[in-house]
Amino acid sequence: MLTLQNWLSFYEKNYKFVGKVIGRFYGEDGLPTPALTLVEAMIIKGLEASKQEIKEKQKFPPCNAEWSSTRGSRFWCSQKSGGVSRDWIGVPRKLFKPGAKEPQCVCVRTTGPPSDQLPDNPLHRNHGDLDHPNLREYTGCPSLATSCSFPP
């Protein structure tokens, strides 16, 4: 739906409006049909999901990754991994998302309070987001390593 919204925005910006097509989305009176109202609601949900995804990507940026037949796989974190600039590097972790078939490699902040806690909360353990329940360490990778290699 967001792709359709982008397409519509492009045409609204670059072309002169000449009218509406009577059919599924507009009646003969030119008013929106219930089908258009449903589509607009889906677009709003899509925009909210997109905002949530951006927020999650700030919290758990994707790892850098490379693979070669001779060296195997390597995941690593940097201050710009996943295209997200930040003031921390983080450590690679598997993030298990509900409904996803495979975990995703993300970089996780290792110090300070969890992202969903206020910085001045004295009860945090100074582990950053390491205690998040959907995260798992990579087997064979040191707990606080910023890079993990897995030979072929």
Image (spheres, rainbow, N blue to C red):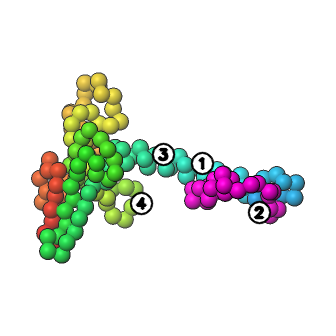
Task: Give the amino acid at mark 1.
Answer: Ile
Q: Quadrant of the N terminus?
A: bottom right
Using the numbered discs, state the Cα–Cα distance from disc 3 to disc 1 in whole angstroms. Answer: 11 Å
Label 1: which secondary element: helix
Q: Position of residue 17 (x, y in %)?
A: 76, 54
Which circle's residue, 2 or 4, is located before the other in the chain? 2
User: On residue 99, which mark appears?
Assistant: 4
Residues tagged 3 and 2 counted as in contact (Cβ below 8 A): no
* Residue situated in front as seen by the camera: 72 or 111: 72
Vertical position of residue 2 compared to residue 116: above or below:
below
Using the numbered discs, state the Cα–Cα distance from disc 3 to disc 4 in whole angstroms. Answer: 19 Å
Graded by Cα atoms within 10 Å as few (under 14), some (14 to 19) or many (20 or more), the crowding at tag 2 reads few
User: Residue 105, located in which quarter of the rendered image?
Assistant: bottom left
User: On residue 24, which mark appears?
Assistant: 2
Label 2: which secondary element: loop
Label 4: which secondary element: loop
Which circle's residue, 3 or 1, is located before the other in the chain? 1
Residues drawn in magenta? 1-23
Which circle's residue, 2 or 1, is located before the other in the chain? 2
Judge whether residue 32 can be spotted in this image: yes
Task: Give the amino acid at mark 4.
Answer: Gly
Q: Position of residue 149 (x, y in %)?
A: 15, 62
- Residue at 21% across / 37% down in the picture? 111
Judge whether residue 42 can be spotted in this image: no
Instruction: Say which of marks 2 and 4 sits in front.
Output: 2
Which residue does the numbered mark 3 point to in the structure image? 51
